């Protein structure tokens, strides 16, 4: 369908059209329930906008935009203490602190929009550009100048939606891949997974499981998540602040709100040692896919107990048992995720600086600040 679309921008999930979820059936992260979570517990430096696209007053597309104010953050991540990190932080604070994003900065993958199959790619591109211009104007009217505009994360098959003539001023980039674990149809139990591993990685599995002796894994309900809220946030924050780069930190109430709204679609697992919470992970049921969400752990225990690796094995075991088709492990920790069987899927985005002079050098600046991640891909399965 080649036509002109209109749009409406919403700030509250309660404002969304009643049939919104008919376009979010394949992605829970565009559903009214998830958008309500963002409304109630988004990071303090993030404003969220929900977009409805219409043709003849009929809803034909839905989308998500976020505005990030990086000046609010005290830290962009504390792991890297090199000169490049200091330069990066200075540039972001002074020239790139206000970011308008089409997509979800908290997730990996195409969580930016969903359109009816009748809407052609060029029409989608034009509609997105109109939304960007309106959002930028609205933000400026409220005293917030936009420095950076970006759209993320699209696979190779999706990138054709962005016609060169419409996005000619944008730099197309690719950072860390999305790590996807595909579950064979004939697997029904964790033992099927273990049996498919080569000897080296089966030994790794046995070693990790033995290291975890004494750790109790427990699914936590809402009341328990509330009870352990302080400890949960401390474990999350330790992992987040030690990442190489961060543009947000979750609100302390985030996991509570997530569980309240998504209920059984949100799984929260606590790991205890001698009665003390030492780690946690979260899983989101997203159709046939299991999405891994945020996690946290006590770094003084993690290495000795191989806690992170055991979490990955637990996620795989549960997803196989429950009949999911794939696990979305997202980006970061690429090599260890690869060692359990996840494969990299390259994702792309577009970025533009609003100052034309700076935008001319966006590619050079981006490649300097975000060099390609060097890692060794593993294959843990028998040939």
Image: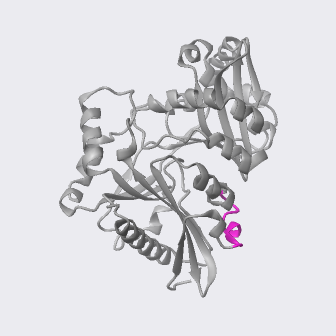
Q: Residue 280: x and y, percent?
A: 65, 29
Q: Residue at x 46, y 62 (%)?
A: 159
Left or right of 283, for residue 102: left
44 w.r.t. 66: above or below: above
Q: Residue 290: x and y, percent?
A: 69, 44
159 w.r.t. 120: above or below: above
The total of numbered circles placed on residues is 0
Q: Residue at x 60, y 24 (%)?
A: 308
Left or right of 7, for residue 28: right
Left or right of 65, for residue 383: right
Q: Residue 221: x and y, percent?
A: 78, 36
Outermost residue on the left side: it is 357
From the viewer's side, name the closer residue of 294 and 285: 294
Q: Residue 311: x and y, percent?
A: 66, 27
**In the rendered structure, does residue 23 fall within the stretch colored magenta?**
yes
From the viewer's side, name the closer residue of 235 and 217: 235
Secondary structure mostly seen in the magenta stretch: loop
Q: Is residue 353 visible?
A: yes
Left or right of 287, for residue 99: left
**In the rendered structure, does residue 287 fall within the stretch colored magenta?**
no
Extent of the magenta region: 18-27
Q: From the image, which quarter does the C terminus lie in?
A: top right
Q: Residue at x 67, y 46 (%)?
A: 258
Q: Quadrant of residue 139?
A: bottom left
159 w.r.t. 322: above or below: below
Q: From the image, which quarter does the N terminus lie in?
A: bottom right
Q: Is residue 380 visible?
A: no
37 w.r.t. 188: above or below: below
Q: Quadrant of residue 349?
A: bottom left
């Amino acid at each position: 369908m080649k036509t002109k679309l209109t749009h409406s921008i919403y700030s509250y999930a309660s404002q969304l059209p009643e049939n919104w979820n008919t376009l979010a059936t394949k992605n829970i992260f565009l559903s009214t329930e998830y958008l309500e979570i963002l409304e109630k517990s988004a990071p303090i430096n993030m404003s969220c906008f929900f977009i409805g696209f219409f043709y003849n007053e009929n809803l034909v597309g839905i989308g998500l935009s976020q505005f990030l104010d990086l000046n609010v953050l005290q830290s962009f991540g504390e792991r890297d203490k090199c000169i490049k990190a200091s330069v990066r932080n200075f540039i972001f604070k002074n020239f790139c602190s206000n970011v308008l994003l089409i997509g979800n900065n908290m997730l990996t993958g195409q969580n930016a929009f969903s359109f009816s199959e009748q809407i052609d790619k060029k029409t989608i591109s034009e509609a997105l550009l109109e939304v960007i211009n309106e959002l930028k104007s609205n933000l400026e009217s409220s005293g917030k100048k936009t420095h950076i505009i970006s759209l993320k994360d699209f696979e190779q098959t999706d990138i054709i939606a962005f016609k060169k003539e419409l996005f000619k001023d944008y730099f197309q980039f690719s950072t860390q891949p999305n790590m996807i674990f595909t579950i064979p149809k004939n697997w029904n139990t964790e033992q099927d997974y273990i049996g498919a591993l080569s000897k080296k990685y089966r030994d790794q599995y046995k070693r990790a499981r033995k290291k975890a002796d004494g750790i109790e894994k427990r699914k936590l309900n809402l009341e328990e998540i509330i009870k352990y809220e302080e400890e949960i946030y401390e474990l999350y924050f330790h992992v987040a602040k030690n990442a190489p780069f961060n543009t947000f930190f979750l609100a302390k109430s985030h996991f509570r709100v997530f569980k309240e709204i998504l209920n059984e679609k949100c799984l929260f697992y606590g790991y205890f040692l001698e009665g003390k919470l030492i780690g946690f992970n979260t899983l989101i049921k997203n159709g046939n896919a299991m999405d891994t969400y945020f996690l946290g752990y006590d770094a003084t225990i993690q290495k000795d107990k191989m806690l992170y690796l055991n979490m990955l094995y637990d996620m795989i075991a549960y997803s196989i048992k429950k009949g999911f088709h794939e696990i979305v492990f997202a980006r970061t920790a690429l090599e260890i995720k690869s060692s359990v069987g996840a494969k990299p899927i390259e994702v792309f985005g577009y970025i533009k600086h609003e100052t034309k002079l700076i935008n001319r050098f966006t590619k050079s600046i981006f490649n300097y600040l975000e060099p390609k991640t060097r890692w060794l891909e593993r294959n843990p399965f028998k040939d």
